[in-house]
Amino acid sequence: MTQASQPKGTGHSISLVTGPDAAVDAVLERHHAAMRAASPEESCHVMTADALRASGAKIFALRDASGEVCAIGALKAFGAHAVELKSMHTLSEHRGKGLARVLLARLLEAAREMDAHQAYLETGSEPGFAPARALYESAGFTYCVPFGDYVTDPLSVFMCRPL
């Protein structure tokens, strides 16, 4: 079951995934595999679909007009009024269309709806993660110290922004 919203002018919809969804899980598996391949295990903080759900994270899917999942992202609450963005991933065949920006805007809106006052994220510090860092910077995220259970790691950067 999902609750959908349609970003204006995109032909896409963004849904909060509230039950099993094989297409969403397939994208989460692709994301998990890509992150595991990009970073050594001790520096890789990606979560499986099952782990995301078990943590209480809210998973969102951006679908095209045909219903194909193009991008995913999740929000994991921590502390009294904070969320962590998890598993932001746009399928390679859908990159360059601005979908990540549309999904990120919806995630931040959902975080505010959850009464979060601050959004955090962890991403890679290596060159392959530069597009992600640029996206987050353009959305108002700034670099910060490790948060939650994270520790300083040369392969990670930490970012936050007020909501």
Image (tube, rainbow, N blue to C red):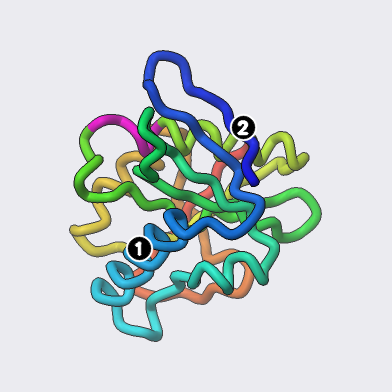
In the rendered image, the vertical position of residue 93 relative to residue 80, given as above or below:
above
In the rendered image, the vertical position of residue 49 relative to residue 96, given as above or below:
below
Task: Report which residue position mark 2 lands on.
Answer: 109
| Residue sitting at x 59%, y 49% | 17
Distance (Cα) linking label 2 and label 1: 23 Å
| Residue sitting at x 37%, y 52% | 89
Residue 78 horizontal/vertical position (percent): 71, 60
Under tag 2, what secondary structure? helix
Task: Report which residue position mark 1 lands on.
Answer: 31
Q: Amino acid at mark 2?
A: Glu
Mark 1 or mark 2, which is nearer the start of the sequence? 1
**How dense is the environment of label 2, judged by Cα within 10 Å: few (below 14), some, or many (20 and up)?**
some
Q: Amino acid at mark 1?
A: His
Queried whether the magenta region covers residue 36, the answer comes back as no
In the rendered image, the vertical position of residue 160 relative to residue 5, given as above or below:
below
Q: Quadrant of the C terminus?
A: top right
**How dense is the environment of label 1, judged by Cα within 10 Å: few (below 14), some, or many (20 and up)?**
many
Residue 33 horizontal/vertical position (percent): 31, 72
Residue 57 horizontal/vertical position (percent): 64, 59
Under tag 1, what secondary structure? helix
| Residue sitting at x 45%, y 36% | 103
Q: Nearer the viewer, residue 27 or 145?
A: 27
Q: Which residues are magenta?
A: 97-101
Side of 54 relative to 13 (left or right) = right
Q: Nearer the viewer, mark 2 or mark 1?
A: 1
Side of 88 relative to 124 (left or right) = right
Quadrant of the rendered structure where residue 2 is?
top right
